[in-house]
């Protein structure tokens, strides 16, 4: 029995999100986030991988093609339906589950080698319980690799670029407020001209993540702040800004 939850508007975004990510990830993923995320993930051949908050499963399929045995979980039934549709066109043996990351009771203790969670942790209402479940299902020495919006520089829509133009130069800074307190905010996604759907994002300070990982016996091994590729710098209006201030974080933690 699948334990679906209510991930709010992720349900309404499934078709758009699936088309946006396609089989490679969208421009931001492909040219900014994923190169660092995948380098930290490393070689997945022969590993049992849990793709947590898998969306349309483009990374699940990549891991599977690279020789991993993949179980992929997302709380949104419509997006998992899209992922299963892609699986039926190209069967790779991926096991898709509709479930809240905070309740992974269908996975046995210490049964997974790697949990990959790409840009989903800050969308999870109970990320503390999700991290606790990651600690439970990982075998000792197994790794948790998560990319997320950088808690220090991207708290959602309340963080904006501040651009100051001087006589000979332009200065870029990032507005951050109420950093110390966790809070929820509505994240707008333009899914069609004039059509905006919001999802809920959850700001938590960096120390909150460190504490939740420690409680789950997950020892931080590396922290990376993805630098933009040349393609991103040239192809995105935010490229030159992201070259100065990172808006994503990749955390790698080992189960001890
Ligand atoms: C920004 S998308 C990222 C999806 C995918 N990892 C990718 O990179 O394309 C965040 C995903 O997290 C899922 N999600 C949100 N809360 C969740 C939860 N509590 N448990 C599992 N998945 C959740 C959403 O349904 C959505 O598919």
Image (cartoon, rainbow, N blue to C red):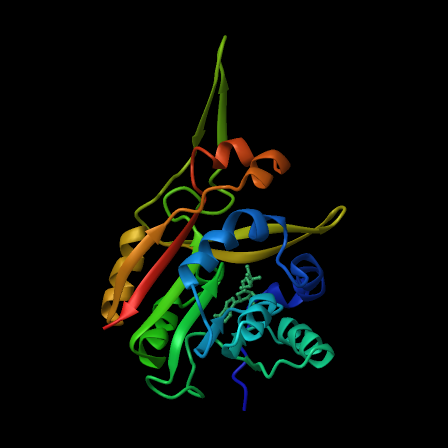
Describe residue 84's horizontal placement relative to residue 31 as left or right.
right
The image shows residue 57 at horizontal and vertical percentages of 60, 70
Residue 183 visible here? yes
Image position of 106 with respect to 25: above or below: below
Residue 124 visible here? no
The image shows residue 28 at horizontal and vertical percentages of 58, 48
Which residue ends up furthest to the right in the rendered image? 193
Q: Nearer the viewer, residue 74 or 194?
A: 74
The image shows residue 60 at horizontal and vertical percentages of 56, 71
Quadrant, the N terminus: bottom right
The image shows residue 233 at horizontal and vertical percentages of 56, 35
Residue 138 position by quadrant:
bottom left
Q: Nearer the viewer, residue 198 or 46?
A: 46
Describe residue 86's horizontal placement relative to residue 165 as left or right.
right
Q: How many labels does the image show?
A: 0
Which residue ends up furthest to the bottom in the rendered image? 1
Which residue ends up furthest to the top in the rendered image? 167
Residue at x 61%, y 37% (from the top left corner):
236
Image position of 150 with respect to 105: above or below: above
Quadrant, the C terminus: bottom left
Residue at x 43%, y 63% (from the top left corner):
42
Residue at x 48%, y 28% (from the top left corner):
162
Image position of 205 with respect to 85: above or below: above
Residue at x 52%, y 58% (from the top left corner):
200
Image position of 129 with respect to 171: above or below: below
């Amino acid at each position: 029995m699948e334990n679906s939850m209510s991930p709010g508007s992720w349900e309404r975004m499934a078709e758009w999100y699936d088309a946006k990510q396609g089989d490679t990830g969208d421009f931001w993923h492909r040219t900014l986030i994923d190169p660092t995320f995948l380098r930290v993930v490393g070689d997945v051949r022969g590993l049992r991988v849990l793709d947590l908050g898998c969306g349309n499963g483009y990374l699940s399929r990549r891991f599977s093609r690279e020789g991993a045995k993949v179980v992929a979980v997302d709380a949104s039934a419509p997006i998992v339906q899209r992922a299963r549709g892609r699986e039926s066109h190209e069967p790779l043996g991926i096991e898709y589950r509709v479930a809240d990351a905070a309740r992974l009771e269908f996975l046995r203790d210490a049964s997974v080698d790697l949990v990959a969670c790409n840009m989903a942790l800050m969308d999870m209402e109970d990320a503390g319980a999700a991290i606790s479940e990651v600690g439970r299902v990982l075998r000792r020495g197994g790794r948790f690799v998560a990319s997320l919006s950088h808690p220090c520089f991207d708290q959602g829509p309340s963080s904006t670029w501040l651009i100051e133009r001087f006589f000979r130069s332009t200065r870029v800074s990032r507005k951050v407020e109420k950093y110390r307190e966790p809070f929820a905010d509505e994240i707008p996604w333009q899914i069609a001209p004039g059509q905006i759907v919001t999802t809920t994002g959850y700001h938590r300070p960096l120390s909150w993540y460190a504490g939740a990982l420690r409680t789950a016996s997950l020892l931080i091994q590396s922290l990376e702040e993805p630098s933009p590729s040349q393609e991103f710098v040239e192809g995105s209006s935010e490229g030159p800004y992201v070259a100065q201030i990172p808006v994503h974080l990749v955390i790698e933690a080992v189960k001890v």
